Amino acid sequence: MADGGARAGTIFVGGGEGRIPQHLVLKRANRHGLIAGATGTGKTVTLQILAEGLSRAGTPVFMADVKGDLSGISQPGVAKGFLAERAAAIGLSDYVFEPCPTVFWDLWGEKGHPVRTTVSELGPMLLGRLLGLNDVQQGVLDLCFTVADDQGLLLLDLKDLRAMLTHVGDSAAELRTVYGNVSAASVGAIQRRLLSLDRQGGETFFGEPALTLADFLTTAPDGRGTINVLAADRLIESPQLYGTFLLWLLSELFESLPEVGDPERPVLVFFFDEAHLLFDDAPDALVDKVAQVCRLIRSKGVGVYFVTQNPDDVPEVVLGQLGNRVQHALRAFTPRDARAVKTAAETFRPNPAFDAAAVIGELGVGEALVSLLDAKGVPGIVERTLIRPPASRLGPADEAERAAVIARSPIGRRYDAPVDRESAYEILAERARAAERAEDDAREREEREERRAREEAEAEAADHRRSRSRIPSSRAPRRTTRRSRRQSVGESLAKSAARQVGRELGRALFRGILGTLGRSR
C-alpha cells in the first residue's frame, strides 16, 4: 500500500488536498500519544489505522475493544463508496483491503483466550484501588501481604486472600508486636469488598495459569506484529476492574522488559480506550506511579496511547508526556466542554494559519487536528487532517469469524483450563485440620487418663474393702483402719489434684508447641 507522501520508517496517518501529509515516525512512536474526541467523531478509526500501520511495521499491539467493533481488524475491509472517496481525497494509491494477524483475549474466556493474574502479582496497591479501600483498610491489606510473604504463603486467587485475611484476623494478638495492630472491622470490610469483586468476575480473573506477557509480543510468520484485542464490552461494566487490569498490564511491562532506549520501532504499543476509567477516583499516589511508569517505560520500547473524549480526562502529569496527538471534534455545549476545547487547543504547537480552538468545534467525522513528533522528537505544528481509511473491516467480526480466528491462534489452548495448585488457602486449611486433630488427640488422652484414674480409685476402694473384711473386730484396729482410710482418701485426693494440674499444663504446652510449629510449617 502506498501514498503520495509515503516515507520509510513512518505510518501514514492522513492528509488531504492542500494539506501537509501526517506521518507517525516509528522511532518516536514510543513517546506515547493521545487520541481524543467526542463520541462518533472517528476515534476508533484512528486507533484502527495506527494499529494496522504498527502491525505492518512488525510491532505488536494491545488494545481494549470497549464497544465490540474493533474485532473487525481481524477481517479484510469491505469496499464502500465513502472509503474510496476518502482514499482519493488524501492521495492514497494502491488502496487494498487486508486483515491483520489478531489474537483475541477475554477475562471470562468467552470471546477469546482467558486472561488471568494472581493476587500476589497484582500487589496490594492496585488491589486496594480495585477494592476502593480507605487508608486504614489499605494498611491492613499491606500487612496481610507482608505476613503472607514472611510465612511463604502464596496468594494466587481470591480464596487464598480470604483465607489469609481470616488468618491475620484470628492471629491479631500474636501479630501485633511484629506487624502492628490489626483492625477486625477493617478485615471484615475487606472481606465484604472481596465478595463484591467476586460478583464482578474477580474469581475468574485471579488464578493460574497467569498471563505470560511474552504472548503479547509475538509476530506473524510474515513478520507483521500481532494485534491483541481484549474483549472489554462486558468488562467495561465493572470500571474499577477494567482500569485496574490495564494499570496492572502497564506495570508488569515496566517491571519485566529490558531497557532498549529508542528502538527503530516500538517493542509494543498499548491503546487504552476509555482512559478516564484509569484515573477516576485514583489516589494521588497511584496517579504519580502511573506518571512515573509512563515516563520510564518508553526507554523499554513501549508506547502508551490514551483514547478518551476530553484531554482533561488524563491528569496533567501524564498528559504532558504524550507527544503524538490526534484531536477529533469536540462540541462546546457546556462550560466543561468549553474548558476541554481550550485545553486541547493549548496543548498543540500553534499553527498561524488557523485558530485551533475554533477548528476543534468545526471538524467533521474522520477529520482531526494532528500533531506528531518528527524524527528529532520535536512536536510538529498542528495540522487539520483527513484520517486515512483502514484496510481492515470497519465494524465487528461475527461469532463464526471470531471463532475461526481463535481456533487458529498461535496461543493454542495454553490458558483454557484453570490450575489450582497448593497455596495459602490449602496450607491454612491443612493447618486448621491439624490443629483440630491435635485437640481431638489431647481430648482423647485426657479422657483415657480420667478413665484410668477412676479405675485406679475403684481398684483401691475394692482392695480397701477386702482388707477390712480380714481385720478382727477390735476397737484399736478399727481406729487404725479409719486413720488408714482417712490417709488413703487424702492421698487419693492429692494424687487426683496433681494429675489434673499436670494434665492442664501438658495440654497448654502441647497447644503452644503445635501453634508454633504450625506457624513455622
Image (cartoon, rainbow, N blue to C red):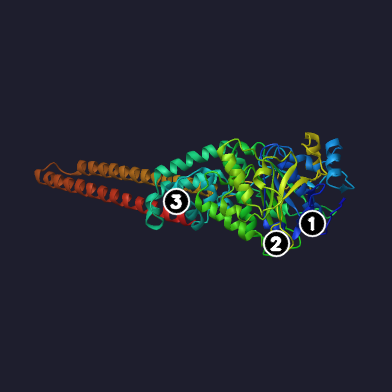
Please give left or right for residue 449 compared with residue 227 in the image. left
Which residue lies under the disc numbered 2? 377
Q: Name, please, the residue furthest toward the left.
A: 475
Which residue lies under the disc numbered 3? 139
Mark 1: which amino acid?
Thr
Give percent across and percent down for residue 255: 62, 59
Residue 243 seen in this snapshot: no
The reply to whether discs 2 and 1 touch (Cβ–Cβ < 8 Å) is no
Distance from the alpha carbon under mark 3 to that under mark 1: 48 Å
Q: Quadrant of residue 73?
A: top right
Q: Quadrant of residue 341?
A: top right
Residue 172 seen in this snapshot: yes
Mark 2: which amino acid?
Gly
Please give left or right for residue 237 compared with residue 285 in the image. right
Distance from the alpha carbon under mark 2 to that under mark 1: 13 Å
Whichever of labels 3 and 1 marks the residue nearer the N terminus, that label is: 1
Foreground label between 2 and 1:
2
Q: Secondary structure at mark 2?
A: loop
Foreground of the two, 264 or 367: 367
Which residue lies under the disc numbered 1? 10
Residue located 59% across and 41% down the image: 338
Give percent across and percent down for residue 146: 48, 55
Distance from the alpha carbon under mark 2 to that under mark 3: 42 Å
Whichever of labels 2 and 3 marks the residue nearer the N terminus, that label is: 3
Give percent across and percent down for residue 492: 23, 47
Q: Secondary structure at mark 1?
A: strand
